[in-house]
Amino acid sequence: MKYALTVLLIALVVLAACGPGAAPTPTPVPPTPTPEQASQATQAPGEEEVQLAPELNVFNWTDYIDESLLEQYEKTYGVKINYDTYASNEELLAKLQAGATGYDVIFPSDYMVAQMIELGLLAELNLDHIPNFQYVMEDFKDPPFDPGNKHSVPYQWGTTGLAYHVPTFGDEVPDSWAYLFEPDHLKKYADKGVNVLDDPRELIGAALKYLGYSVNDTNKDHLFQARDLILKAKPYWKTFNSSDYDDTLLIPGEVVLSHAWSGDAFVAVWETYDEDKDEAIWWYAIPKEGGVKWVDTMAIPASSKRKRTAEHFINFLLDPKSQAAITNYTYYASPSEAAKQYIDEEILNEPAIYPPKEVMDKLEWLEPVGDAATLYDQIWTEIKSQ
Ligand code: N2P
């Protein structure tokens, strides 16, 4: 252990200086080790020596990593990863606000990063400890929700749209939010199942966008119109699910239409692809009215006691090869320029995963809504309880 070696060296120097008959010099008292110092430093060859904690508590969205990376990190660095998942930013925030102090690495989205910074929930990062940040595309650096990347670095990004069962819709492409909100549309396929994301900002945002407003609108009348639209459509929806809807609803055919995040939709696209006919059973459309584009980040809760190890793990996940492994597994897009060389061609060239500029320009980032957050909460409670 590096620390023990230093103490030993100091003791030897002190002893040599004392000489026979000299007055004994007090031996330095070592400070109490932090969890990080308590562990053996282990690093891959050629890496700077870092004192790593024996364990790290990681809290991520469901189905959002290639889990072999966790094993790889544990084996290479001797740090045990305790991995737990959540289904929405609001769930993550509620856990942190309820005083959950064990988490070391979390993955809040853009608007939630801003909200958490304001609430003092995030630690400041030392970007010198995250050298793989250099590979992040300029577009994803210094974002408005966290100027200077003081508290977060990007993890993966994507869009929100509609996943649909191709045999049900035939030649028709559900390319409008009307397919999710208008009873006239819903009547035609609702008996076969429709799912919406169990996510207040996403669902209310989609309704606002369909009505011609911004996904970040804070006007009370507009928000009530969005609520009414949702309440009229709700009887036609089978489920509110944003955690495992790809595996439990889309792939087994429990629904034929779902409000969906791009990567989750593509899990269903690839899992159900008809190789013989070379035809997709599921596909994904971004509504013509526009919608949400988002970037999820990696951050460290202010309460973490293992900040240096958390930064080390974040750096590992930002390594171009790790980034590519995540994208190749989750079908979300990577913010790492250098990862591109390792990402599967068909993912990189898929416009529904990496949309062209004209589509991206129609989409909006979610932003904090300030005092209107209370109104969003009220509306959400109303929607879920009726
Ligand atoms: C992955 C969830 C992606 C997070 N299942 C959307 N922000």
Image: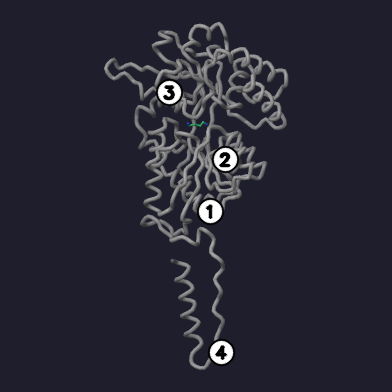
- The circle on residue 23 is 4
- Distance Cα–Cα, label 3 vs label 2: 25 Å
**Near-viewer residue (358 or 297):** 297
* Mark 2, residue position: 142
Q: Position of residue 290 (x, y in %)?
A: 55, 19
**Residue that extends furthest to the left in the rendered view of this protein:** 276
Who's the residue at 47% across and 59% down the image?
Answer: 51
Helix, strand, or loop for circle 2?
loop
- Between discs 2 and 1, the one toward the N terminus: 2
In the image, 195: left or right of 217? Answer: left
| Kind of residue indicated by mark 3 | Pro
**Residue that extends furthest to the bottom in the rendered view of this protein:** 21
| Kind of residue indicated by mark 1 | Arg
Task: Examine the rendered structure and indicate whether residue 376 appears above or below residue 40.
Answer: above
Helix, strand, or loop for circle 4?
loop
- Between discs 3 and 2, the one toward the N terminus: 2
Asked whether disc 3 touches disc 2, contact meaning CB atoms under 8 Å apart, the reply is no
- The circle on residue 207 is none
Task: Examine the rendered structure and indicate whether residue 333 appears above or below residue 313.
Answer: above
Task: Examine the rendered structure and indicate whether residue 161 appears above or below residue 348.
Answer: above
| Kind of residue indicated by mark 4 | Ala
* Mark 1, residue position: 306
